[in-house]
Image (tube, rainbow, N blue to C red):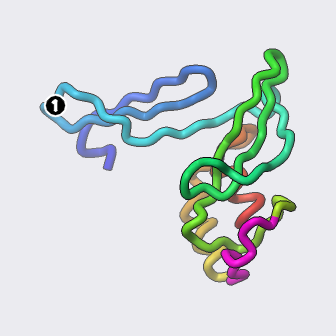
Amino acid sequence: MLTQGHYKIIKKNNLYKIFYTEYNKQQWYIYDMVSYYKVGEWLFLGFRKSKVKNKMYDAILKHVRTGRIKYLPFGDSRYKNFHDLTGLDAYPHLVHGDSERRRRYRRRHRVYLRSGYYSPSYFSWHYLW
């Protein structure tokens, strides 16, 4: 999709935004918002049930220097997942346990993981799939 136009990536406060536009257009659109948080700068505190629509859980992160708390939503409450290792077990009806589905999910989503960073993909990969 990005090959048909121009794109630029802007980093601000450890949040990466990818802006995309098609040729011959002046207006930039947000194509995707991906948030990555460096493991050394953020401490992982735990999980809570998400207050964001259609999200299962929030990972609670705390900035080492500033003490700022960040709630990182992950997991879609409309779809099933392989298992739930968060310890909250808020969605037991969404656990399917199908190894083939897990293998296909991991093959599709491994491109979103970055070594040394927390992200919604990181928490979905390690705690739901």
Overall secondary structure of the magenta section: loop
Question: Which residue of the protein is positioned furthest toward the top in this rendering?
Answer: 66
- Residue at the image position 37 percent from the left and 36 percent from the top: 30
Label 1 environment density (alpha carbons within 10 Å; few <14, some 14–19, many ≥20): few
Q: Secondary structure at mark 1?
A: loop
Residue tagged 1? 25
Q: Nearer the viewer, residue 127 or 93?
A: 93
Image quarter of the C terminus: bottom right
Count how many numbered circles sit on residues in the image.
1
Q: Quadrant of residue 20?
A: top left
Q: Quadrant of residue 60?
A: top right
- Residue at the image position 74 percent from the left and 45 percent from the top: 59
Residue 123 locus on image (x, y percent): 72, 52
Is 97 within the magenta? yes
Question: Which residue of the protein is positioned furthest toward the left in this rendering?
Answer: 24
Q: Say left or right for 34 vs 89.
A: left
Q: Quadrant of residue 3?
A: top left
Q: Nearer the viewer, residue 84 or 53?
A: 53
Q: Say left or right for 10 vs 8.
A: right
Residue 41 locus on image (x, y percent): 79, 25
- Residue at the image position 82 percent from the left and 29 percent from the top: 40
Q: Nearer the viewer, residue 97 or 93?
A: 93
- Residue at the image position 82 percent from the left and 21 percent from the top: 67
Residue 37 locus on image (x, y percent): 69, 33
Q: Amino acid at mark 1?
A: Lys
Instruction: Report the span colored magenta.
Output: 89-98
Is 101 within the magenta? no
